[in-house]
Image (cartoon, rainbow, N blue to C red):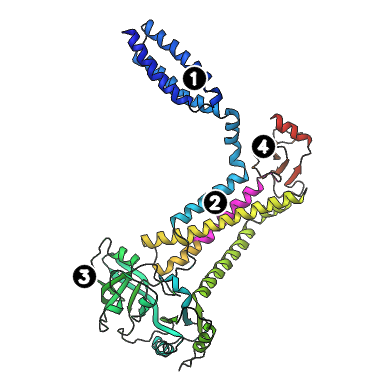
Amino acid sequence: MQERIARRLLRWCNLILYAACLIVPRRRRVEWFRERRRGVWHWVHFLVESDRLTIQTEQELFRYCWGSFADAFWCRFNRDRTLAFVRSYPATPRFCLLSIFLIVLAALAASPVSLWRSPEDARNAGSLLSVSLNGNSHWLEPELLWDAAVDWSHNPLVASAATYAWRPSVIAGPAGKQDVLSARVTPEIFKLLGAKPLWGQTFDNVDSACSDCVVLSDAIWREQFPGDTKLSGEFLRLNGRRVHVVGVVSDRFRLPDADVQVYTPFQATPFVRLPGFEWPGVVLRLANGAPPNVAKIQREVRETNFPTPALLDVLSVKDIRYRSLRSWFGIGAFAILVIVGLNWRAFRQLCATSPRRSTLDAFRWWGFFALKNALLVAFVWLLSVHVVEGVLQRLGLVPLHMTSGVAMWAFLVGLNVALGWSIRDQNARCRSCLTRLRTQIILTASSVPLLDPSGCDLLCDRAHGMLHVPAMQFSSLDSERWIDFDESWQTLAQDK
C-alpha cells in the first residue's frame, strides 16, 4: 500500500519536474532534472516510511515541485542580470520613447485618424470644389447662391452642383432638447457626395413637396432614438416646427465647412432672411475627374456677379485639408510658446545644463527631446480631437457644434501638461547616456549640519556625470549645473 502511494506521488512529481526542466538550457537539463528528482525521491519515501504523509505535507511537496518552474526560469535567465535589467530599463530613453509610442498606437486604435472627415465617396474627392463666403465678405442670401449654382452646373466642366445653407438650431425629441447645426440642402447633395442612407431614404427619393421632412446624422439618431431602426412615425421639433424623420446618414457625411447634424430640403423651407445667421455654400463636382481646368473654374466662380457684393472662397478638398492642418499647426505653435513661457525656469535650466563636452552628446540630447515631444504632441492631438470629441458627441455633454471648440481647449491643456512633464523629465536625465538620474546625495552645510539641506547631487549610475541641484533655485550664489566625470569614474561604475 505504501509503495503504491509512493509511486503515485513520484509519478506526479516527476511529471511536474519534467515540464519545468524544458525551460532549462539543453546542456544543463539532464543534470538539473536528476538533482531535483533525487531530492523528491528521498522526500516522498521519508514521508511514506515515517507515516508523516498527510494532506498538509503532500501540499508542501507539490508546492516545492511547482516552485521548480521559477528555479528553471532563473536557470535559463541570469537572475542578477534580469533583475538589474528590470530595475534599470525603465530609466532608459528607449523605454520612454517606446512607452509613448505604444500609447500613441492605443489612441490611434481607439479612433481612426482623419485630418478632415471627407465625404464618403473619398475616391472621387479630388474632383470636388467647395464654394463658400469669404470671412471678409458681406452676407449673401442662400437663394442667390442657389441660382448661381444652377448657372454653374451648365458649364461643361462641371458635372453637378448642390447648394446648402447651415445655421445653429435647436431640436426637441424623446431624449430632450439639443443644440445642433441644421442645414437646408438641395436633394442632389447626398448623391454628389456619395452618401448612402443607413436607414430610410434621402431627399432625392422623397416628394419635393415634403416641407416637413428631415434627414438626421447617425449620432443624433442614436441619441434621440437609441436602438430604434424603424423610421415610420418618428417626429422631432426643429426650431419649434414639427418635422418627420425620413432617413439617417452616416456621421462621415459632412459638409465642407460645417458639422451639420440635421438636414432639411432647401426648396421646401419658407424663405426667411437670416443675415449673418444662416451661411450658404455650394459643392461642385467636376466633369472627368479632376481636370487641369480647375483654376479656370475657380476664376469663373469668383467673378460671378451678385446683386449684393460677395467674396467667394473656391477650395478643393486638398485645400481644405491643408487649411485645417495650417490652423492646427498654428494653434500648436502658439501653445508651445505659451508652455515654454509658463515653464521658462525649467526650460532655462534645460538649456544651461545641456551637454557641452561633445557635439554627439548634444545631438543625442536635443534629438531625444524633440522626438519625445513630437510623440507627446501626436498623442495629445489624437486624444483631444478624436477621443474627447467622440466621447462628448456620444454622451451629449455639450452641443454638437461646440465639440470641436472643447476638443481644442482639451488639446491646449493636455499639451501644457505633456510638454511640462517632458521638460522636467529631460532635466532629470544624464547628459551623456540619457538615463534618468536616480542616485541622490543630500548636501548639508559643513559648519551647521543640523540646518536644512543646501541642495542635492544626482549621480548617473554609469558614472558619466553629476547634476547639482541647489535647495534655493533663485539664489545667486549657487545654481543648477551639470558636471562631467572623467574616465577614472568608469571603474567605480563597473564595480558597482
Instruction: Examine the rendered structure and indicate whether residue 245 appears above or below residue 186.
Output: above
Q: Secondary structure at mark 4?
A: strand
Residue at which label 4 appears:
440
Give the residue type that dot 1 points to: Phe
Compared across the picture, whether 207 is left or right of 48 comes to: left
Mark 2 Cα within 10 Å, few/some/many (few <14, many 20+)? some
In this picture, which residue range is highlighted in magenta?
A: 410-431
Residue at which label 1 appears:
33
Circle nearer the viewer, 3 or 4: 3
Of pointers 3 and 4, the one earlier in the residue sequence:
3
Q: Position of residue 408 (x, y in %)?
A: 50, 64
> Looking at the rendering, in which quadrant would you find the C terminus?
top right
Q: Position of residue 218 (x, y in %)?
A: 33, 66
Q: Position of residue 95 (x, y in %)?
A: 58, 44
Residue at which label 3 appears:
232
Most extreme residue toward the top, as rendered?
50
The tag on residue 464 is none
Of pointers 4 and 2, the one earlier in the residue sequence:
2
